[in-house]
Amino acid sequence: MDVESRSPRIPRLSEAGGNPTERGPGASGPYSPARRSLLAWVQQPIAGPANQKSQRRPSAPLYCPIAAPGRIAIRRVPYAAAKRLLDVVVSLIALALVFPLFLIAAQAVKLTSRGPILFKQTRVGLGGRLFPCYKFRSMYMDAEARLEELRHLNELSGPVFKIKRDPRITPVGRFLRKFSVDELPQLVNVLQGDMTLVGPRPPIPSEVAKYTPEQLGRLAVKPGLTCLWQISGRNQIGFERWVQLDLAYIETMSFWGDLEILVKTVPAVITGRGAC
Protein backbone atom coordinates (compact mmCIF):
# COMPACT_ATOMS: atom_id res chain seq x y z
CA MET A 1 0.00 0.00 0.00
CA ASP A 2 1.48 3.39 -1.00
CA VAL A 3 1.76 6.40 1.27
CA GLU A 4 -1.18 8.25 -0.26
CA SER A 5 -3.58 5.33 0.33
CA ARG A 6 -2.64 5.29 4.04
CA SER A 7 -3.21 9.05 4.52
CA PRO A 8 -6.33 9.80 6.58
CA ARG A 9 -9.19 11.24 4.59
CA ILE A 10 -10.90 14.39 5.85
CA PRO A 11 -14.67 13.78 5.57
CA ARG A 12 -16.91 16.37 3.93
CA LEU A 13 -19.51 18.20 6.00
CA SER A 14 -22.28 16.15 4.42
CA GLU A 15 -20.65 13.06 5.88
CA ALA A 16 -20.23 14.73 9.24
CA GLY A 17 -23.90 15.23 9.94
CA GLY A 18 -24.72 18.27 7.76
CA ASN A 19 -24.30 21.97 8.36
CA PRO A 20 -23.96 22.71 12.10
CA THR A 21 -25.99 25.92 11.74
CA GLU A 22 -29.00 23.89 10.63
CA ARG A 23 -28.89 21.39 13.50
CA GLY A 24 -29.47 22.10 17.13
CA PRO A 25 -27.21 21.30 20.05
CA GLY A 26 -28.75 17.91 20.43
CA ALA A 27 -28.29 16.87 16.82
CA SER A 28 -27.22 13.36 16.32
CA GLY A 29 -24.48 12.20 14.01
CA PRO A 30 -21.06 10.64 14.01
CA TYR A 31 -19.42 13.98 14.95
CA SER A 32 -20.19 16.58 17.58
CA PRO A 33 -20.96 20.23 16.55
CA ALA A 34 -17.49 21.28 17.70
CA ARG A 35 -15.90 18.58 15.54
CA ARG A 36 -18.00 19.62 12.55
CA SER A 37 -16.93 23.28 13.02
CA LEU A 38 -13.30 22.19 13.02
CA LEU A 39 -13.83 20.21 9.80
CA ALA A 40 -15.47 23.26 8.15
CA TRP A 41 -12.44 25.40 9.04
CA VAL A 42 -9.96 22.81 7.74
CA GLN A 43 -11.78 22.53 4.40
CA GLN A 44 -11.64 26.29 3.69
CA PRO A 45 -9.35 27.37 0.77
CA ILE A 46 -5.85 28.21 1.90
CA ALA A 47 -4.96 31.89 1.32
CA GLY A 48 -1.22 31.27 1.00
CA PRO A 49 1.43 33.11 -0.99
CA ALA A 50 0.54 31.21 -4.17
CA ASN A 51 -3.09 32.32 -4.05
CA GLN A 52 -2.12 35.85 -3.07
CA LYS A 53 0.27 36.04 -5.99
CA SER A 54 -2.38 34.89 -8.46
CA GLN A 55 -4.82 37.50 -7.15
CA ARG A 56 -2.31 40.35 -7.13
CA ARG A 57 -2.94 42.88 -9.86
CA PRO A 58 0.00 44.25 -11.85
CA SER A 59 1.03 47.67 -10.61
CA ALA A 60 -0.05 50.58 -12.80
CA PRO A 61 2.74 52.49 -14.61
CA LEU A 62 3.88 55.75 -13.03
CA TYR A 63 3.57 59.03 -14.90
CA CYS A 64 5.24 62.40 -14.62
CA PRO A 65 2.73 64.67 -12.78
CA ILE A 66 2.64 67.41 -15.43
CA ALA A 67 2.21 64.77 -18.14
CA ALA A 68 -0.57 62.74 -16.52
CA PRO A 69 -2.50 60.32 -18.77
CA GLY A 70 -4.83 62.19 -21.10
CA ARG A 71 -2.86 65.45 -21.17
CA ILE A 72 -0.73 64.42 -24.15
CA ALA A 73 -2.14 63.40 -27.52
CA ILE A 74 -0.33 60.19 -28.40
CA ARG A 75 0.86 60.10 -32.00
CA ARG A 76 -0.36 57.10 -33.97
CA VAL A 77 2.56 55.54 -35.85
CA PRO A 78 1.26 53.93 -39.09
CA TYR A 79 4.36 51.76 -39.44
CA ALA A 80 4.52 50.74 -35.77
CA ALA A 81 5.01 47.02 -36.50
CA ALA A 82 7.86 47.66 -38.95
CA LYS A 83 9.42 50.19 -36.54
CA ARG A 84 9.32 47.68 -33.69
CA LEU A 85 10.83 44.96 -35.89
CA LEU A 86 13.62 47.34 -36.87
CA ASP A 87 14.22 48.17 -33.19
CA VAL A 88 14.56 44.53 -32.18
CA VAL A 89 16.69 43.36 -35.12
CA VAL A 90 19.11 46.30 -35.11
CA SER A 91 19.44 46.30 -31.30
CA LEU A 92 20.27 42.59 -31.16
CA ILE A 93 22.84 42.92 -33.94
CA ALA A 94 24.35 46.05 -32.35
CA LEU A 95 24.60 44.42 -28.93
CA ALA A 96 26.42 41.45 -30.45
CA LEU A 97 28.83 43.69 -32.37
CA VAL A 98 29.65 46.10 -29.54
CA PHE A 99 29.83 43.53 -26.75
CA PRO A 100 33.68 43.74 -26.59
CA LEU A 101 33.31 47.53 -26.34
CA PHE A 102 30.83 46.99 -23.50
CA LEU A 103 33.45 45.04 -21.57
CA ILE A 104 36.16 47.63 -22.18
CA ALA A 105 33.91 50.51 -21.17
CA ALA A 106 32.74 48.69 -18.05
CA GLN A 107 36.29 48.01 -16.91
CA ALA A 108 37.37 51.59 -17.64
CA VAL A 109 34.51 53.00 -15.55
CA LYS A 110 35.14 50.56 -12.71
CA LEU A 111 38.90 51.11 -12.48
CA THR A 112 38.98 54.91 -12.79
CA SER A 113 36.33 56.15 -10.35
CA ARG A 114 34.37 55.03 -7.34
CA GLY A 115 30.78 53.91 -7.86
CA PRO A 116 28.69 51.52 -9.95
CA ILE A 117 29.44 50.80 -13.60
CA LEU A 118 25.90 51.44 -14.78
CA PHE A 119 23.87 54.51 -13.97
CA LYS A 120 20.09 54.04 -13.79
CA GLN A 121 18.05 57.22 -14.02
CA THR A 122 14.31 57.79 -14.16
CA ARG A 123 13.32 59.25 -17.52
CA VAL A 124 10.00 60.29 -19.06
CA GLY A 125 8.75 58.25 -21.99
CA LEU A 126 5.68 57.88 -24.17
CA GLY A 127 2.76 59.92 -22.87
CA GLY A 128 4.67 60.91 -19.72
CA ARG A 129 5.24 57.37 -18.44
CA LEU A 130 8.29 57.00 -16.21
CA PHE A 131 10.87 54.28 -16.86
CA PRO A 132 14.43 53.42 -15.77
CA CYS A 133 16.98 54.47 -18.38
CA TYR A 134 20.44 52.85 -18.42
CA LYS A 135 23.83 54.41 -19.15
CA PHE A 136 27.46 53.78 -18.40
CA ARG A 137 28.24 56.03 -15.45
CA SER A 138 30.17 59.04 -16.73
CA MET A 139 30.05 61.31 -13.66
CA TYR A 140 31.40 61.30 -10.13
CA MET A 141 29.10 60.05 -7.39
CA ASP A 142 28.36 63.56 -6.05
CA ALA A 143 27.18 64.89 -9.42
CA GLU A 144 23.58 65.51 -8.37
CA ALA A 145 24.63 67.30 -5.19
CA ARG A 146 26.88 69.66 -7.17
CA LEU A 147 24.29 70.55 -9.81
CA GLU A 148 22.92 73.65 -8.08
CA GLU A 149 26.33 75.24 -7.63
CA LEU A 150 26.94 74.90 -11.37
CA ARG A 151 23.50 75.81 -12.69
CA HIS A 152 24.46 79.44 -13.36
CA LEU A 153 27.01 78.16 -15.91
CA ASN A 154 24.36 76.51 -18.06
CA GLU A 155 25.08 77.04 -21.77
CA LEU A 156 21.68 75.94 -23.10
CA SER A 157 18.38 77.74 -22.87
CA GLY A 158 15.27 76.13 -21.44
CA PRO A 159 15.03 73.47 -18.73
CA VAL A 160 18.02 71.36 -19.81
CA PHE A 161 21.50 71.74 -18.27
CA LYS A 162 24.68 71.46 -20.36
CA ILE A 163 28.15 72.92 -20.01
CA LYS A 164 31.16 71.99 -22.12
CA ARG A 165 33.67 71.45 -19.31
CA ASP A 166 31.37 69.99 -16.69
CA PRO A 167 33.64 69.24 -13.68
CA ARG A 168 31.29 66.46 -12.55
CA ILE A 169 32.26 64.31 -15.55
CA THR A 170 35.12 61.85 -15.09
CA PRO A 171 37.98 61.72 -17.63
CA VAL A 172 36.75 58.35 -18.88
CA GLY A 173 33.20 59.63 -18.87
CA ARG A 174 34.18 62.53 -21.10
CA PHE A 175 35.49 60.09 -23.70
CA LEU A 176 32.41 57.89 -23.42
CA ARG A 177 30.12 60.88 -23.88
CA LYS A 178 32.01 62.30 -26.83
CA PHE A 179 31.41 59.14 -28.85
CA SER A 180 28.04 58.25 -27.24
CA VAL A 181 29.46 55.01 -25.80
CA ASP A 182 27.78 55.84 -22.47
CA GLU A 183 24.38 55.44 -24.14
CA LEU A 184 24.98 51.94 -25.54
CA PRO A 185 23.17 50.26 -22.57
CA GLN A 186 20.02 51.98 -23.80
CA LEU A 187 19.85 49.30 -26.48
CA VAL A 188 18.43 47.22 -23.62
CA ASN A 189 15.75 49.88 -23.11
CA VAL A 190 14.92 49.54 -26.80
CA LEU A 191 14.54 45.77 -26.51
CA GLN A 192 12.35 46.22 -23.44
CA GLY A 193 10.06 48.51 -25.43
CA ASP A 194 10.53 51.65 -23.32
CA MET A 195 12.54 53.30 -26.08
CA THR A 196 12.96 53.08 -29.83
CA LEU A 197 16.00 53.55 -32.06
CA VAL A 198 14.76 56.81 -33.59
CA GLY A 199 12.79 59.30 -31.55
CA PRO A 200 13.19 62.36 -29.28
CA ARG A 201 15.70 61.89 -26.48
CA PRO A 202 14.07 60.95 -23.14
CA PRO A 203 14.01 63.88 -20.68
CA ILE A 204 14.20 63.69 -16.90
CA PRO A 205 11.10 64.55 -14.79
CA SER A 206 12.54 67.83 -13.47
CA GLU A 207 12.93 69.07 -17.06
CA VAL A 208 9.43 67.98 -18.08
CA ALA A 209 8.01 69.86 -15.07
CA LYS A 210 9.15 73.10 -16.79
CA TYR A 211 7.81 72.23 -20.24
CA THR A 212 5.32 74.44 -22.03
CA PRO A 213 2.26 72.76 -23.60
CA GLU A 214 4.03 72.82 -26.97
CA GLN A 215 7.17 71.20 -25.56
CA LEU A 216 5.07 68.41 -24.02
CA GLY A 217 4.45 67.35 -27.62
CA ARG A 218 7.89 65.68 -27.53
CA LEU A 219 6.27 62.96 -25.40
CA ALA A 220 3.72 62.03 -28.07
CA VAL A 221 5.96 59.19 -29.28
CA LYS A 222 8.45 56.81 -27.69
CA PRO A 223 11.81 58.35 -26.86
CA GLY A 224 14.75 57.21 -28.94
CA LEU A 225 18.50 56.78 -29.11
CA THR A 226 18.88 59.23 -31.95
CA CYS A 227 16.81 61.79 -33.83
CA LEU A 228 17.18 64.92 -35.94
CA TRP A 229 18.82 66.73 -33.01
CA GLN A 230 21.71 64.23 -32.90
CA ILE A 231 22.53 64.63 -36.59
CA SER A 232 22.06 68.42 -36.61
CA GLY A 233 24.76 69.44 -34.14
CA ARG A 234 23.54 68.11 -30.76
CA ASN A 235 24.65 70.52 -28.04
CA GLN A 236 25.63 73.18 -30.56
CA ILE A 237 21.96 74.12 -30.99
CA GLY A 238 19.63 75.62 -28.37
CA PHE A 239 16.76 73.92 -26.64
CA GLU A 240 14.06 75.76 -28.63
CA ARG A 241 15.57 74.55 -31.90
CA TRP A 242 15.95 71.07 -30.36
CA VAL A 243 12.21 70.97 -29.63
CA GLN A 244 11.40 72.23 -33.12
CA LEU A 245 13.44 69.40 -34.65
CA ASP A 246 11.74 66.81 -32.44
CA LEU A 247 8.27 68.08 -33.30
CA ALA A 248 9.19 68.17 -36.99
CA TYR A 249 10.27 64.53 -36.77
CA ILE A 250 7.00 63.55 -35.08
CA GLU A 251 4.95 65.26 -37.79
CA THR A 252 6.87 63.69 -40.69
CA MET A 253 8.09 60.38 -39.22
CA SER A 254 8.29 57.43 -41.60
CA PHE A 255 10.10 54.11 -41.86
CA TRP A 256 12.47 55.37 -44.55
CA GLY A 257 13.04 58.56 -42.60
CA ASP A 258 14.10 56.47 -39.59
CA LEU A 259 16.57 54.54 -41.73
CA GLU A 260 18.03 57.79 -43.06
CA ILE A 261 18.50 59.16 -39.53
CA LEU A 262 20.18 55.92 -38.40
CA VAL A 263 22.62 56.06 -41.32
CA LYS A 264 23.46 59.72 -40.65
CA THR A 265 23.93 59.01 -36.93
CA VAL A 266 26.93 56.77 -37.57
CA PRO A 267 29.33 59.52 -38.81
CA ALA A 268 27.96 61.96 -36.22
CA VAL A 269 28.87 59.49 -33.45
CA ILE A 270 32.25 58.53 -34.90
CA THR A 271 33.36 62.16 -35.22
CA GLY A 272 31.81 63.19 -31.88
CA ARG A 273 30.34 66.26 -33.55
CA GLY A 274 28.43 68.52 -31.16
CA ALA A 275 29.15 66.49 -28.01
CA CYS A 276 29.91 68.20 -24.70
Image (cartoon, rainbow, N blue to C red):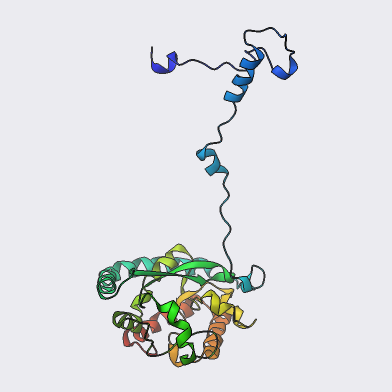
* Rendered location of residue 193, percent (x, y): 48, 64
Q: Nearer the viewer, residue 240 or 136?
A: 136
Where the N terminus falls, by quadrant?
top left
Identify the image quadrant of residue 139: bottom left
Q: In the picture provided, is 259 more to the left or to the right than 67?
A: left
Q: In the picture provided, is 9 more to the left or to the right than 66?
A: left
Where the C terminus falls, by quadrant?
bottom left
Q: In the picture provided, is 228 more to the left or to the right than 137?
A: right
The residue that appears at 45% across and 63% down in the rendered structure is 192
Q: Nearer the viewer, residue 209 or 220?
A: 209
Where 146 sits versus 274, above or below? above
Where 173 sits versus 95, above or below? below
The residue that appears at 30% across and 66% down in the rendered structure is 96
* Rendered location of residue 215, percent (x, y): 60, 82
Identify the image quadrant of residue 145: bottom left
Q: Nearer the viewer, residue 159 or 196?
A: 159
* Rendered location of residue 138, percent (x, y): 35, 77
Q: In the picture provided, is 276 more to the left or to the right than 11?
A: left
* Rendered location of residue 254, percent (x, y): 52, 77
Number of residue marks: 0
Residue 259 in sight in this render: no
The residue that appears at 46% across and 82% down in the rendered structure is 147
Residue 109 in sight in this render: yes
